[in-house]
Image: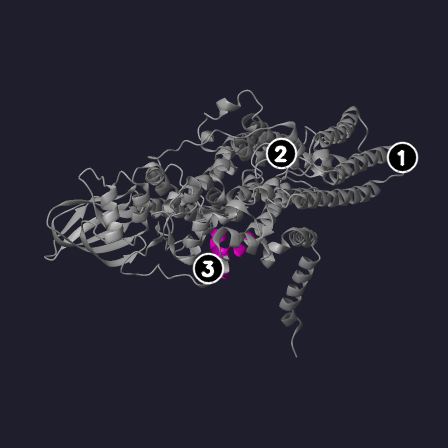
Amino acid sequence: MSSPSDSRPSSAWLLTVERVLSSTALRRGITLTACIVLLQLAVFLTFYTGQSIPPYDFLGAYAGDAFVWWTDGGFFNRTEWVPYVWAGYPSASGLQNSGWYLPTGIITLFGPYSLHLAAILAAMHVAFGAYGMYFLLRVLRAPFFVALFASVAMFFGVGFFSNASHIDIARAYAWMPWVLLVLTPLWKWNRWWSIPVATLIVWQALTGIYPGTTVAAVYVLVPWVVVVCLVYRPRVTAFLLPLAVSGVVALLLSMPRLLPYFLLNGGGDVSRDADSSRFTPSVLGTVLFSYDYKYDIPNDVTMRSFFIPVAVLVLALFARWSDPLCKLACALGVPALLLGMPFLPWYNAVQSLPGLGLSRFTMSDFKLFLVLAAILLACSGLRRLTSTLTQPRVTRGMAVSLTLASLLVIGFSVLAVSGRQTKSEVVYPLLLLGFVVALVTVFVVYNNARDSKWFASSARGGLATLFSIVIILATAGSGLLWAYTTPGPWNVNREAIELKAYGATIDSLISQRADNTGELTQRPARAPLPEDLTRKLLYNRQGNAAFFSGEYSVAGYINLRGSESLDTLEQTLLTSDIRHEFAAFLALPGTILAVSEEGRTTKTALSDCVQNEDCGVDATPVSYSPGEYVYQVSLTNPTVTNLNEAYFPGWSAEACFADGDCVPLTPELSPYGTIQLALPSGDFELSLSYSPPGRGAGWVLFGSGLMILLVTIATTVVTTRRREVTE
């Protein structure tokens, strides 16, 4: 027979479980998760089933680069050279390829990175952003229903839908609430895990977010940190110091990605098209109404919408300046407004600020922070209206807010009449806006009219809870109505769009993928270019099928702005006198062509090489793998040659003779954008290999960041234990 003491551990465990199951935090967590799951099913169910995906650039290099990076290589086994389109290029030359981005790597554990998986990951980012907004508001000491309202409002952040095809812009909407969370002194900086988690958030945000939005974030987050310090008055050692450590470590962890990129890009044309952002009354209408192709609204269809859920619009008018949420909203909104709105007289001058001139969508880059500011203002307004500490009275300020809310309905009604949307597309949003304004008005007036002795605090609390629930439902309804009014920019049939873009579905391409990643004798031939080549055909998205099929193609849609090699190659293929012959030369299997001492060639020489296999060099392919070439060469005289592979800094070569003597050679940029190589006379084995500049130094800095992180964790743990012993 067991003693009573034997049952104590079991009883204690059961008591703990009972306490957890009955905790308020658990109930709230279940409520939050239920809301997000229901919204995920209502909006993105077809993403999960594989029926639909986002269109446009979602099928471009975003998908192909990521597939190659995580399929042919990985985080610690990178594919340094991507051979599938054009004449090849370094994986390090692009910042938007999802390389080093851990969520992409994690989802590839469930299968190859197809567009189906990419769409699932996009949907999960929306949920991630909604969770981030909830925790941000809770950390900022907002009540549960206010935080839940913010979460639902963030779920319908405009960039998740209008910019769904630009996955790194959409990611910014998912990551920025988490970044703001760690940029506050209310983050638990005294815990051992605080700096590692903050570092992970900042590092992956830097890795996954569109560069233009990252630059805009710098201009907005500095004022945010200043205002946070003024509002909460933290000690430097309790906030700014650990924040600085997290930022520095995150930057060091990014060096294997950033350092090679900046060393590779800089010699090319980094100029961009003029900023195309415009803001007109019709753009103002997109705050509430649809924004599809058929409407006379400026900006690209993915950049034109400023949608904000109706409840956010209305409640933002009731924000209270004394509320910290209001001040933090201004810290985000004011700089975003001043720097990102094209109707301001200094907008063109703003483009000359460091970094801002790199993006041609400056308004879109700052839009995220206007949306976040609006949600924070609305949360301040909801907290003001539903506070059980004081009864909302129809003061002068409250009367002004109610008047502005009524004018809001009138203003959007005028925009609806002057716009080109159909009646059904404007009536329902206007009715929902009018309903929220009426609901707020009735709530304020009714609450103010009740006798304070009879209308107890508990009764006010129940009414406030009911009011909050209706507001949350109205927010969800507004978001669903808007999203499905304009599905084109974020939801198209997957199979149909894959067939149109690639000529086959991604699944079929992957299932029949040619294994060209192992060691072969010679680099395979590339699919040739059409005779009537245009820039549009050169950047044809159909060429990107090569990423998934394993076959090679000269054409393909890639974005390597600032690359001198690709700029030169593009000019050769589009404007030079030898463009047709040179395109045929690029399409050949791995080949070495003799050229003049200046690196020039002729139509005749190229035609002889392509048609008669007379390339002026006795070169026999020995082995090939991406970024590794070996030829057996025999020359009677020193010869300048041109390989049909793109040149980038990082190529190395050597000629090894039969006696074991190896001579290093220097690959150079040819006048055509390909590898130019001066070869010695004699019989030798020519080896070329590619490794991006700065990769080794980047890994050293990465290791330094990890060491700093480990020392910081150890220091925090020791300091905490000493404090506990002292106390």
Residue at horizontal 67 percent and vertical 67 percent from the top:
11
In the rendered image, which quarter is residue 253 located in?
A: top left
How far is the residue under mark 2 from the one under mark 3?
44 Å
Q: Does the magenta portion include 583?
A: no
- Mark 2 residue type: Ala
Q: Circle 2 is placed at which residue position?
A: 373
Q: What residue type is labelled 1?
A: Asp
Residues packed near mark 2 inside 10 Å, few (<14), some (14 to 19) or many (20 plus) = many
N-term-proximal mark, 1 vs 3: 1
Quarter of the view holding residue 265:
top left
- Residue 509: assigned label: 3
Mark before the other along the chain sequence, 2 or 3: 2
The residue shown at (23%, 55%) is 630
Q: Give the range drawn in magenta.
A: 102-119
> Element at badge 1?
loop
Near mark 3 (Cα within 10 A), the count class, few <14, some 14-19 or many ≥20, is: many
Residue 144 pos. (x, y %): 70, 45
Looking at the magenta stretch, what is its main secondary structure?
helix
Say few, some or many: other residues with alpha carbon within 10 Å of mark 1 (under 14 / 14 to 19 / 20 or more): few
Q: Is mark 3 on a helix, strand or loop?
A: helix
- CB contact under 8 Å: marks 2 and 3: no
Q: Are marks 1 and 2 in contact (CB under 8 Å)?
A: no
Foreground label between 1 and 3: 3
Using residue 256 as the reference point, say whether residue 727 is left or right of it.
Answer: right
Q: Which amino acid does label 3 sit on?
A: Leu
